[in-house]
Image (cartoon, rainbow, N blue to C red):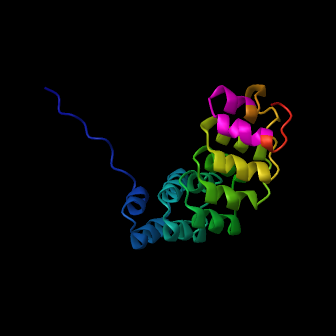
Amino acid sequence: MKKKQEPPPMPSIYEAVKSQDIVRLRECLKQGGNTDDFKGALVNACEAGETEIVKAFIKAGVFDSWAIVAAARFGHTDLVEWLLKHGGGNINAALIAAAAHNRIDSTRVLISAAPDALDEALADAALRGYSDVALLLFNAGANPGQPVYGGQTAIELARKNGHADIVKLFCQKGENNC
């Protein structure tokens, strides 16, 4: 019988992030290594909301434009704010991620960064039935009648997915496709 082969060990940088060991993380960063591992570990830290770990990565010059997306998706609003002040990243994707996961505080912060993806974010919120996020985006200027994904609009997606409260909201606010 063959002995079951163990998976390779996780790179030390990931272990440092997982264990929230800032001292070990700084040692790993000083030693250098695989840039992709560093970026992946940074995104993992953002998913977990580990602000001090993220700050150590940024201070060491490690940056990934998807870090802010991970922070927004998981609703780590303080970290989203910090990343906006220290390099930003893919703000449009972050806004869409926040809206698609009903992270109203992160959505609010990202709207203030003047992204170009208000309509897409509104469509995601409408699709999933997140009325508070939809209202926030609508009030920020998102257009529920603007075709986005596959030519569908936010109001069509809300209607198709049974979110009558969002359809009603758009209609009360003057949407033409009611």
- Image point 65% across, 66% down: which residue? 81
Image-quadrant location for residue 6:
top left
The quadrant holding residue 13 is: bottom left
Extreme residue in the bottom direction: 23
User: Is 45 above or below relative to 174?
Assistant: below
Given residues 160 and 25, the one toward you in this image is 160
Residue 95: image location, x then y, percent: 68, 51
**Front residue of 2 and 87:** 87
Q: Is residue 161 magenta?
A: yes
What residue is rendered at 78% in x and 27% in y?
151
How many marks do you count on the picture? Answer: 0
Q: Is residue 160 above or below residue 129?
A: above
- Percent position of residue 17, x then y: 43, 61
Residue 92 seen by the camera: no
Q: Say left or right for 101 vs 94.
A: left
Against 166, residue 16 (above or below) is below
Location of the N terminus by quadrant is: top left
Magenta residue span: 156-171
Tell me if 51 is positioned left or right of 16 in this view.
Answer: right
